[in-house]
Amino acid sequence: MSEVAKKLRDRRLNVWNEAKAIADRAAEENRAFSAEEQGTWEALNGELDQLDTRIKAVLDQEKRSKDADAAFDALAGKKVEKRGNDQVDTEVRSWLRGDPGQGRHLDLRPAGPVNFRTLSTLTTGAGGNLTPTDFYDRLIAHLIEVSGVMQCGPTVLNTNGGETLQIPKTTAHSSATSATQASPLVTSDPTFGLATLAAFKYGILLKVSRELIDDSGVDVIGYLAMQAGRALGNKFGADLVTGAGTTQPTGFMTSATVGVTGTTTGKTGAPQYSDLVDLEYSVIAPYRQSRSCYWIARDATIGGLRKILDSQNRPIWEPSMVLGAPDLLLGKPLVADPFMPATATGAKSIAFGDFSQYFVRMVGPVRFERSDDFAFDSDLITFRAVLRGDGILVDQTGAIKTFQGPTT
């Protein structure tokens, strides 16, 4: 991390401490903010937003500069120690140009916290061991950036085939009863059900000029990854939130039950502090205490949540002290998802609960294929990215609860 990024991070921490001091002082004196304190509070929060944007921009620029330096060193013939990701970049660029000996398609298999279960076939296809994991890492990183669901720790199942996948689950537990001496005991068996996951297809075509591929070097990889990742992520991510489940995944908001309906407020459909506390405790303790227990809402809604104070005039939102980690709301991580419904009268706009109970099914690798012939007359190279997947909330009895705005 550069000195610029470190200074911005330190400034962010100082700004937060200044804001916290204002809130703590008002809380100790058991009073609301004065007009001057309110103005300072809002200015400091605005600066926090600006610092977050600048920090992200600086880190992105540093990564681009590092990639560009490596590419120029290679072109200049400088001896550079080859590492796994550098070698993969070279192989991917060779495949993108269609050099002799390169195949016509490329399978991208996930790397990371994916649960491979015994219910899937784990044999590697021809050439699978040559998969360029660095390119897939960039693709999935963009996918996660646009879909907040994937940041909340859902259970990810990866299967080689797209056959219907059935997940057994309990719908009711056994219960004991008191019994008198010598009386027969009452039978109580658990009941079971099935959650079904299909394999819906998402895809995109990208047409790229040969000049761009030949002249751009390493940058074309980032460009293609950004375009394909955002396109797939935007559609798949939206369905994971509000999908109807017939020809698309069943979104968690579609299946989650209402934990609390808000009271009348000055802003239509917005929650009060007490509403959020009630929503948190509408989720039972085993789910509420899970490591995958998150708040999730769209950016505009989170902006309103940052302004809410508790009964002691303290903000219920806390910024993360670690770059890349989510901020906190009432002590639990808060994730922004652009596909969450907006705050409105009667609308379900906030969700809270254990997202490990939301299962995301990924069928095999993300396929990324090329064709030199599809647009031969225009000297364009066509790339095709395809993803197959599904999603469903397995425990629909209360693992995730939603806030519904007041009707008036």
Image (spheres, rainbow, N blue to C red):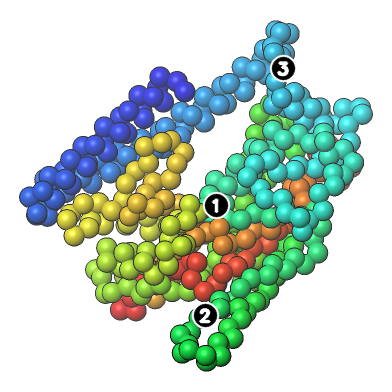
Left or right of 283 in this view: 207 = right
Query: Measured from the top left, where is residue 162 in percent x and y?
Result: 79, 60
Residue 356 versus residue 41 in the image, above or below: below
From this viewpoint, is residue 226 visible? yes
Q: Nearer the viewer, residue 345 or 322?
A: 322
Circle 3 or circle 1, nearest the eye: 1
Q: Quadrant of residue 222?
A: top right
In space, the residues marked 3 and 1 are separated at their CA atoms by 33 Å
Residue 153: give its label: 1
In space, the residues marked 2 and 3 are separated at their CA atoms by 62 Å
Query: Measured from the top left, where is residue 137 in percent x and y?
Result: 66, 38
Q: Residue at x 72, y 50 (%)?
A: 116
Identify residue type, mark 3. Lys
Callouts 2 and 1 close, C-beta under 8 Å: no
Q: Residue at x 56, y 69 (%)?
A: 395
Residue under numbered circle 2: 175
Left or right of 319 in this view: 108 = right
Q: Residues within 10 Å of mark 1 (few under 14, many from 20)?
A: some
Q: Earlier in the sequence, mark 2 or mark 3?
A: 3
